[in-house]
Amino acid sequence: MTNLPNPRGLSRLGPRGTFGTALLAAAELNPRVVGVTADLAITAGLERFRVKYPERLLNVGIAEQNLVGIAAGLAEDGWQPFAATFANFAAMRSNEFVRHHLGYMRQKVSVVGIGAGFAMGQFGTTHYSLEDVSALRAIPNLTILSPGDCTEVFQAVLALANDPQPCYLRLSGAPSMRPVDQSDTSFQIGRARVLSTGSDVTIVGTGSMLSVAAGAAGILQERGISVGVVNVHTIKPLDEDAIRGLIGSTGAVVTVEEHSILGGLGAAVAEILSAEAGSPPLRRIGVPDRFPKVGSYDFVLKQCGLTDLLVADEVGDWISRHRRAAAATT
């Protein structure tokens, strides 16, 4: 594997710029890596890739279904395509194509959903991608990755260049995505990264909300609550052993995601814990089942309660209520 760039430098590039940098590195290591885009080469961070490998970047125009179909054809011919477009178009407009070509036919394509969650800000609801994980998670044979910071974006791209499974790579977060210290763990598709342990509650984060989970954990620790943090960068296949490992080791579990609370990370974790005896109580934090008001990225996150302080307050209040209820029954 190539040496990883400086995390702070990648953070300044943002998830899209990091994706382009990582794909360039992957292409240098693997001559079969190609990029495919729906008229978004610059937006997807692929300008340097286009300059260095013009013959290995294909622009299919604003035709997202064709994007997936053409990428599948390239995969059938032995190429390793990364097909990039906005996340909502990748997951929903192209859903049937992803199902047939990647799920059913198992073509090795990495569909890259850029601008996931609220990253498109003022572009509004038509460009918000809040249902993409739930729309794709039921498709068999499809891996779903949601990196927690830009270093992890880089790691994920390099891993996908050598992974045989079709994948949806979800790129969420602001243009300057906060780095998270994960130096004590390694990146492996399908394996969660346990960043810390806590006896009172464990916050399970994914994508852009990993840094929020870590920030909220720090606030809660200052309030005397023992908090652990787990990074689920692979939503499918979910690391079931890591989730089951929380049973008996923590008092409660909270999931945090920049996605609808329906069908995403919270639902996946609930599916595991609900089948196990003695599971701790679970609270899902994410986008409520409604379309929020349009605004800047930070404005919409605050509206949905997805900041360090707001998550810490919600978790702290929930833990307090849970303790009072438990005390009342004894």
Image: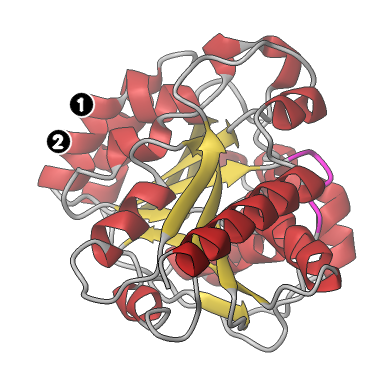
- In depth, the one of 46 and 117 nearer the eye is 117
Q: Quadrant of residue 128?
A: top right
- The answer to which of 229 and 296 lies nearer the viewer is 229
Residue at the farthest bottom position = 184
* Place of residue 219 in the rendered image (x, y in percent of width and height, measured from the top left): 83, 63
Amino acid beneath label 2: His
Residue in view at x 47 percent, y 74 percent: 192
- As shown in the figure, which amino acid type bears the numbered disc 1? Glu
- Residue 177: within the magenta? yes
Q: Is residue 142 left or right of residue 185?
A: left
On the question of residue 24 being in view, the answer is no
Residue 196: percent from the left, percent from the top?
65, 82
- Residue that appears at 58% across and 82% down: 199
Residue linked to disc 2: 100
Q: Mark 1 touching mark 2, by CB under 8 A? A: yes
Q: Mark 2 Cα within 10 Å, few/some/many (few <14, many 20+)?
A: some
At 72% from the left edge and 84% from the top edge, which residue is drawn?
183
Q: CA distance from mark 1 to mark 2?
A: 6 Å
* Region in magenta: 174-178
Label 1 element class: helix
Left or right: residue 285 versus residue 7 is left
Relative image position of residue 186 (x, y in whole percent): 58, 84
Could you say which disc has been placed on residue 96 in the image? 1
Q: Which mark is residue 257?
A: none
Between residues 276 and 307, which one lies in front from this camera angle? 276
The secondary structure type at the circle numbered 2 is helix
Judged by its main secondary structure, the magenta piece is: loop
Q: Quadrant of the N terminus?
A: bottom right
> Residue 175 appears at what percent x and percent y?
80, 39
Please state, as top left, top right, bottom left or bottom right, where the C terminus lies in the image: bottom left
Is 250 rendered above or below residue 30?
below
Q: Magenta span has 138?
A: no
